[in-house]
Image: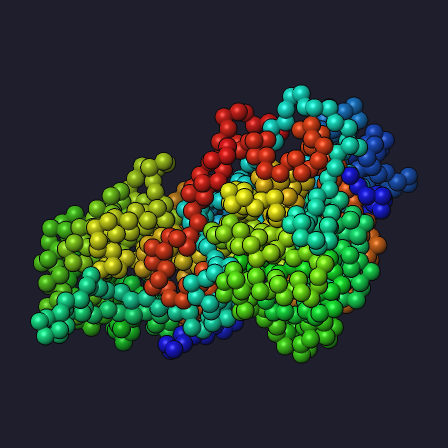
Amino acid sequence: MPKKYHIHPKATPLELDYIYKFKIVRGENCINCGKCSKVCIYQAHKRSEADPRKMADPNTVVCRNCFRCIQECPRGALEKSLDTGYVNTGGSYWKADMLITLWKQAEDGNVPVSGAGYRGPFTGKGFDSMWTDMSEIVRPTRDGIHGREYISTSVDLGRKLNHLAFGAERQLISKVPDTVDISLPIVFDIPAEKLSSSIKLAMVKAATELNTFAIMLVADITAEFEKHIDNIVPRLAAAEIDANKEIIKKARMVSVEYDDTLLKNFAVIREKIKKISHALLIIRVPAVKEVEYTASKLARDGVEIIHITADYRGQELNSSAGSGSRHLKDIIRSVHQRLVEDKMRDEVTIIASGGIGLAEHVTKSMLCGVDLTAIDLPLMIALGARIYEEREKYLVLPEGLASIPTAVLEQRMINLMSAWHSQILEMMGAMGIREARRLRGESGRAIFFEEIDKDTFGKLF
Amino acid sequence: MKPSTVNIKVAPSRFKHKVPKYKITRSDACINCGTCAKTCPYGVHERVEGHNKVKRPIDYKCIGFECQSKDFYCVAKCPRKALSLSLNPMYETLGDFRWPADMITGTWIMAETGHVPERTDIEYNIGNSGGGFDKLRFKFPAHPKKVNKSDISTEIPLNRRNDGRANVVISTPVYGGGMSFGSVSLPTMVSKAHNAAMWNTFTCTGEGGYPENLQPYNDHVITQIATGLFGVREETIQRVKIIEFKYAQGAKPGLGGHLLGEKNTESVAKMREAVKGTSLFSPFPFHSVYSIEDHKKHIDWVKEINPDALVSVKVSTPNDVDMVAVGSYYAGAHIIHIDGGYGGTGAAPDIAKKNIAMPIEYAITKVHKFLKDEGVRDGITLIASGGIRTAHDLAKAICLGADGVVIGTAELVSLECVRCGNCESGRGCARGIASTDSELADLFNEAWATQRLTNMYNAWNEQLIEILQKFGMHSVKELVGRTDLLKHIDYSHETESL
């Protein structure tokens, strides 16, 4: 049996306000009878400490929407509504409910559980237009969720051989390339927003604790980060390689930005890095139209890892808004398909990022064809960041974050990843898949809306 | 048709106030003349003689914007223009895409009165999910065959195998889903069984044992054998007419059950033959079933123990659900019960509810077709659940190919569930429906709950009969698989009409 992978969550409340959904207002006709405090099982209603003859303002942060105070107040004096903070935060992709659930997962590391069935739309865009399969009676593996300690979420990064070659003496003559093994199919992509070094340090330390990586602009890798270089991927432009030899030398992986000249100069750049270190090379490619062409070329040229980055809502970049813009899910499927057709898919590692906001997006991305994902904004939400989409992306970090110890920030990111890890295990257990490596491109274990709808309703109506 | 055992009686809300859809605002311009109190026939306004202010309007009694055309519209009548009407912000906090506030309100009215709402301002048949049932519409013929409502049968047989076992017939093609002892309160569980007896249909124990209080209704109880085998004994299998194997459930397809230690109280532990206070796991899947052949052994075993009972097989909706259904037919099952991914009442990981397994609408279509192609459709009863919210969903499910449906959430909504979703946290259900907390479980009695359920079943049955009448049919059996009577608004170019 492989060594078990454990993440250690720890309840870590952040003493900062976050978004809450409901707001209750006590009307002037309240007679301070205290009925609400008796019927509320969540202690939203209490008597005022200063003057116990009066009721205090409702503590609606704890409200779970049971309607009992509303329905039982003898005077009908209580009114509930959606809180304006809830209504105004987020957008069409990063919905306020998503922010709240990520925040809660960061508090305790638990899998979100609720009763009364699913409450969302039937289907949606992007990742919401697919379901994952499960196995009922006949299943590929028999471990289900209760062999979950032995479901492995490890993936490896690097170039792999298409086949092994043997010499006349039956000796192995292929040189097996180095790979890097991480325990979660997730790496951290430190966002471009201006962040304090305490937040970046927390991200790096959390990545270290989780046995994964943080991708970080090379300029940000100051002395205090160097001792964590084993879990940092320096990110730089090809022109910056010479100036950063010392860091590249120590790194296990290096991420180089793609640009128009890169394809032409690829061999030179690779040689240059090879001379400096053994680091695996990631080419960070924006998810523009025809990115599959770029991926195919890079794979042919021998690149080890391709990192495809969509925008923060998982949309294709530089495309005119509207119909032409693909979602990350479809970009991944297309890139994967292209590399399969080129008979090179098994040789390269693909990372996808942009719009990965929930644990389910990780599993679904992998089913669509990537080896692993990179995340940024969920880690910020774990720290209480709010995202606004209108008119443009706007990330607001809470005031007072500077005074929170790095260890707390780190633990909250670990908690979030613990919750995601458990959720990925739930999905894999249901699918009967024990190895995260086997999720890649396993579209037979996915149910795509367009396909099933066409296959059933399309034939009838 | 409703059995003679069914009595419809008004069963009002247990709470003082209902959840209002509209809001009447009274401004400072009010001079306390009392015109509004005199004009409103619904009692929204109340003026007490001697008080210097008219009371705050009772919003939930207001019928809303359709009142604008009435000559008693308070806003128009007020001499000082002090009143205004708007949607109540509170209403937005009730419900969700699948169960919008109108659908919950409509179900409450059915449970209270036994009939569909008279109000025309609430859409109680279609949700806002934007897919599946919510996009399907009936194509009623302009000139249907004339059929009297009293001649329309809603009965369905559950044994279609002709294997000499009991010919169980239910009076309405709906029965109650499995909710285990421990997950819902005893009054909830017993009232479900009592109602099933009145309606000559069934309810299910869920996994977790067979409480004594259910024994008066043995003929209307399905006992469940689930993967943990909790509470399964020979006598529980022998006392019922239907036994259900639960392979999986829609709320958490592919995942096991987990009863938290703190919910495993003395009585729960006794029922489950377990140690009090320990967490109880129902593994996934049956560790004794590796194939359809093993599945047959299970069914043979239970048929041996109870030679007269029918066997139901409950599965969720993976891609190969159609194959599982055919396998279950050959293994000897009488009922294949498919539970779609969007349903369920019990606590489940959100990630499972949303993402794992397909919605029931697709699964019914696939399974019905596959059973038909295999030539065995007439030998098995196909029951659908997991997202059947309304009488229209029921009729649509039957058109897609089901014989009948199982409901869970709709029953709980009848008992005034608000779908807050906090069934499991802390002390459990704040409204006493899904709680074993001694204080909370006492919030209503069984008689009230039974009446609410009976009323809701009646309103559904009336709607089903009306649909059958509009199609000119004599029996609900004629509706099975009639997809030609449905249209999908994404695929039809006709304009939207109900």
Query: B417 and A150: which one is in front?
Result: A150
* Residue B380 rendering spot, x and y as whole percentages: 61, 48
* Residue B484 rendering spot, x and y as whole percentages: 56, 31
Q: Quadrant of residue A257?
A: bottom left
**Quadrant where the N terminus of chain A is found in the figure:** bottom left
Q: Quadrant of residue A344?
A: bottom left
What residue sits 53% from the left and 64% below the top? B294
Count of numbered marks: 0
What residue sits 68% from the left and 23% below the top? B144
- Residue A17 seen in the figure: no
- Residue A88 seen in the figure: yes
| B400 lies above or below B184 | above
Q: Quadrant of residue B118?
A: top right
* Residue B47 rendering spot, x and y as whole percentages: 86, 38
What residue sits 91% from the left and 39% below the top? B49
Residue B128 appears left or right of A157: right
What residue sits 37% from the left and 66% below the top? A435
| A25 lies above or below A229 | above
| B232 lies above or below B170 | below
Residue B249 appears left or right of B412: left
Most extreme residue toward the right, as rendered? B49
Looking at the picture, the colour scheme in use is rainbow
| B120 lies above or below A385 | above
Query: A432 and A181: which one is in front?
Result: A432
* Residue B359 rendering spot, x and y as whole percentages: 53, 47
